[in-house]
Image: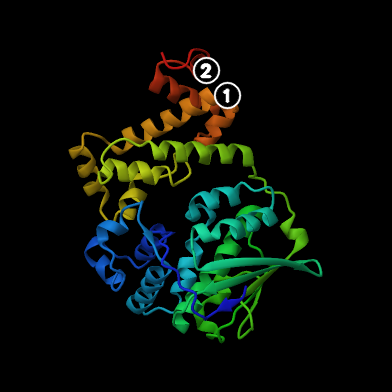
Amino acid sequence: MNQMTQANPTALASIPTSYTRLIAQELGMHAGNLPELLRGTHLTVEQLLDEATRLTAQQQIQVIENALRLSEDDRLGLRIGKRLTPAAHGPMGYLASSSPNLLAAIEAFQAFLPTRVSFVRLDLSQSHGQLIIRCNIDAEMSPEASRFMAEICALAMLSCAEFIIGRPAHEFQTCFMHPDPGPDAGYADHIPGKYSFSGDELLVRAPMELCRIPNVSANHESYALAREQCEAILANLSGEPDSCRRQIETMMLSFPIGTLTEEDAAAALFISKRTLSRRLKQEGVGFRQIRDEILARQARSYLRDGRLSVEAIATLLNYHDSASFRRAFKRWSGMTPDRYRQVGDL
């Protein structure tokens, strides 16, 4: 990964707020002190909590600079990087996690990373049986922020590899450009395999045989369909855009279906679970009701589509077995999935 410090700024706002909210959560921030994290970005707390808001490269870098100042912890990049599992990257993460192997997953990151973080690009090459992943960071920032970005880029790749192969990627070699921060920096606790510092490029090397190990979770057709259906539902959500219900619906469709908990949703909005429950009650709805409506809508859409079996739909909706899904669907719709597939919406 090659790290550039030459200016290549872009005014395009394309970076989701989810990364900034993740930083705020790691810092243990609450709604009242979020303006400190947003200082110099011209963003409001309301905009940060709006799933539709996008940041420019300059705004995201300013958030990182602010976070480093507020945390006074030179391990912050490693802490954030550990949280950047494939699920943290939205549709790009879905595609990567359902790829047939690690090589395809990394190629998905290469293709779609500009849609998530506009100032980072990946270049891939092969040499002597190794895949070389170079990271180009095309923006000006402080040395501290550059180190932060290097750490989260490396850990995002390592996290993806661990998800695909089912264990830490000890065979990876990570080369950083910044000087060795010393043994207390925590690299040994966070980075499997070998790593080095003061290099000419920011890069990761991975054996090609490791990159071709089949992904046991691969199901590209099903997950691509799931993402397609989620985006279709997201585009047609009902309710006021700034309502609490709409925020929860949008959040649910940004996570693997059925996995978002009420505690996680409250934390993402920087409020307590009790406050979230109260706000939803004021709108005449509850968290479980919203979740069931989303699941029911997804289930009916899959059944009408006809490409997936009932068992596959149960898996996509995060049910442990098809019997549990069948019971839930009958509760939602008053009929079994097989019957619904025959008669549709009456």
User: In this view of the protein, can residue 78 be seen by the observer?
Assistant: yes
Residue 242 vertical position relative to residue 146 in the rendered view, above or below: above
Q: Residues within 10 Å of mark 2 (few under 14, many from 20)?
A: some
Residue 42: quarter of image = bottom left
Q: Label 2: which residue? A: 341
Q: What's the mark number on residue 235?
A: none
Q: Nearer the viewer, residue 300 or 289?
A: 300
Q: Is residue 299 left or right of residue 121?
A: left
* Picture coordinates of residue 262, whole percent (x, y): 33, 45
Residue 229 vertical position relative to residue 24 in the rendered view, above or below: above
How many angstroms separate mark 2 from mark 1 (CA)? 8 Å
Residue 41 vertical position relative to residue 213 in the rendered view, above or below: below
Q: Earlier in the sequence, mark 2 or mark 1?
A: 1
Q: As shown in the figure, which amino acid type bears the numbered disc 1?
A: Gly
Residue 89 vertical position relative to residue 232 in the rendered view, above or below: below
Q: As shown in the figure, which amino acid type bears the numbered disc 2?
A: Arg
Q: Residue at x 21, y 44 (%)?
A: 279
**Residue sitting farthest toward the right:** 128
* Picture coordinates of residue 104, whole percent (x, y): 67, 53
Find out whether the residues at labels 2 and 1 contact each other: C-beta distance under 8 Å: yes
Q: Give the quadrant of the C terminus.
A: top left
* Picture coordinates of residue 164, whole percent (x, y): 64, 53
Q: Residue at x 52, y 17 (%)?
A: 341
**Residue sitting farthest toward the left:** 282
Q: Residue at x 38, y 46 (%)?
A: 251
The local secondary structure at tag 1 comes to loop
* Picture coordinates of residue 242, whole percent (x, y): 25, 46
The local secondary structure at tag 2 comes to helix
Q: Label 1: which residue? A: 306
